[in-house]
Amino acid sequence: MVRHIAFFAALPLVAAPLHAQDASAPGTIVVTATHAPAALARQPYSVRVIDADVLAAGASVADVLAQVPDAYVQMTGGRSGFASLFLRGADPNFTTVLLEGVPLDSPTNSRGGAVNLAAVPPAAIDRVELIAGPASTLYGSGPLAGAINLLLAAPSERHRFTASAALGSEEEHVLSGRWQGPLTQGYGGSLTAVWDDAGTGEPQAGFRSRSVDLRLARLDGTRGSLLVHLADTRAHGFPDSSGGYDLAVIRAVEQRESDEIVVALDQPVIHFGRATLAIAGSYSSRGDRVTSPGVAPSVYSETGVPAGADDIRYRRGVVRPELSVDLGAWHATFGAQAQWEAARSSGFLDFGFPMPAQYDRRRATYSGFAELGGTVGPLEIDGGLRLDDIEGIGTRWTGRAGLRYFLDPALSLRASAGTAFKAPSFYALANPFVGNPALRPESATAMELGLDWRPGPNDHISITLFESRYRDLIDFVPSDPPRLENRARVAARGLAASVVHRFGAGLAMTLGAQHVATEDVTSGEGLLNRPRWRGSAQMDWTAARALTLTARYAYTDERDDYAVPTGVRTLEVTHRLSASAVWALSSGTRLRLDGDNLLQDRGADAIGFRPLPRRVRVTLVSSIG
């Protein structure tokens, strides 16, 4: 308790990363939280917006999201490993990650479909929108805890070319190029290419990625767009739960490769009166190839993790007709969706002999949904309902409702509640070693209360209380044979708060804190990798017209982790200090200097995976047009 009091007493003296939220000024339009885009300041749900300037300070999108109070990110082995995002104490695979509204999850991995945000370079993304709370009424199976939408750069009315090059102290280097401009008949486009190499910050580990993103859209911002995304990554490092660089008995590393293709179209087809009929469709394909040396047995695990290899291919097609009706102060959306999935896995596990670990599965999901939202005097109201019929699993109803009441223009109260579900992944259902075809969908019920207050033009205070309950969690049971089963009931309760104050003369401070208690309802035990307290502080100073300085501090409380060599072990408190300086050399050229882990904090994110050392990164960005 003394440690927590000392930490919060010191917050105003240091600096942190929540101006991401306040960068979402009242006029910001959010496209992720409801079917109809709406202003952030009038949303009845918890939404955070992170813009390109904040993203530029991180080595990955995971680095930046780790600064948000609602989310704890465990980085196992830096970018060479997997970044697990625990949103309000929920499992990482309970948060759906989308690219321009298209889901990126692959329900063929052993993490239940969680997306590795450490593999997403910030240079490819223009904005991130995060909604906390059940979102199945919007996105169907998956978002029990929330959704993250990665948005690309919008087209511009004039041709604009941007190039950037970054070089880090651990041989990290990133090159990117972007074009934005008009095309024809009211449409424009943006094209972004990124080459990203994480360098040698971790011993016996590495990460490299290449990506190309093309977006065609209307210049006036109205609906109508085409998206093409291509990416491949290569990484190597010690396997999860192996004990990492410090404790792994088997010193060979795991090799991981992936490729990803996304093509999506969203186009209005008929306008009649106040109604618009649009059709959206997407095709996604992802391949993952993994060769693992396994994890040696220990007194905590008699079998360890067998060595093996896998070659996985997952494909998804979606068609969604949608009717939106503008009713003045109200809006309504009605739609249907058809989704087809196919998964193939071919590989083996080494038990002294190669045991095949193969499956080939398909399923279709048919959905219908409706949403109604609008304004009644000082009250903003939104509600939605959805029915999903999943082949081989059955039907699931989900609903959500939220309201925001303005006591005056500067003070508002929010309240929302909703349900969500997640169908078992193909891995959980069909893996020959641990799969269980009788698994039931996981489900969530959540509610929250919030307050937003802007007592003056230089201040913003936000407080949110939340509670989530999860049922039928899919968990690994070390029986004979081991298998996945529905067994857990989990509750998460807490609060998230932030304070923004601008002192004037180019100086601003942001403070943030989160407390969340997550426990197994049956046993009363806490869950792994859930720190109870997290806090942050940030100071931004425009030192001169061409120079901006930022300092960021983040605190993470103790939390338990598990590794095969050690069993459960408590990880120590971490204190991370970073800083940035941005110098505008000319109207189109900026020089950035970023420093990470300036305190050389040695607290690890996972057992045996030492934190990255103090690092410095220099980035030059130049634009023409």
Image: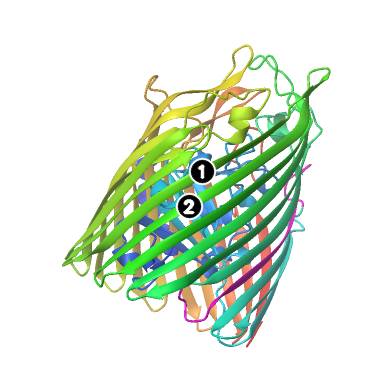
Q: Is residue 7 visible?
A: no
Element marked by disc 2? strand
Name above or below for residue 51 compared with residue 6.
below
Name above or below for residue 78 compared with residue 274.
above
Pick whichever, 246 or 100, lies toward us.
100
Residue 208 highlighted magenta (yes or no): yes
| For marks 1 and 2 on the same chain, the one whose residue lies earlier in the sequence | 2
Pointer 2: residues within 10 angstroms few (<14), some, or many (20+)?
A: some
Q: Which mark identifies residue 365?
A: 1
Q: Say whether residue 604 is left or right of residue 146.
A: right
Q: What kind of residue is marked 2?
A: Gln
Residue 91 highlighted magenta (yes or no): no
- Give x and y (percent) for residue 102: 55, 56
Question: Label 1, label 2: how many angstroms apart (C-alpha)?
Answer: 8 Å
- Give x and y (percent) for residue 548: 52, 75
Q: What kind of residue is marked 1?
A: Thr
- So how many labels did they put on this image? 2
Pick whichever, 265 or 507, lies toward us.
265
Contact? badges 1 and 2 (CB < 8 Å): yes
Q: Which residue is mark 2?
A: 337
- Give x and y (percent) for residue 77: 67, 42
Question: Residue most toward the right?
Answer: 353
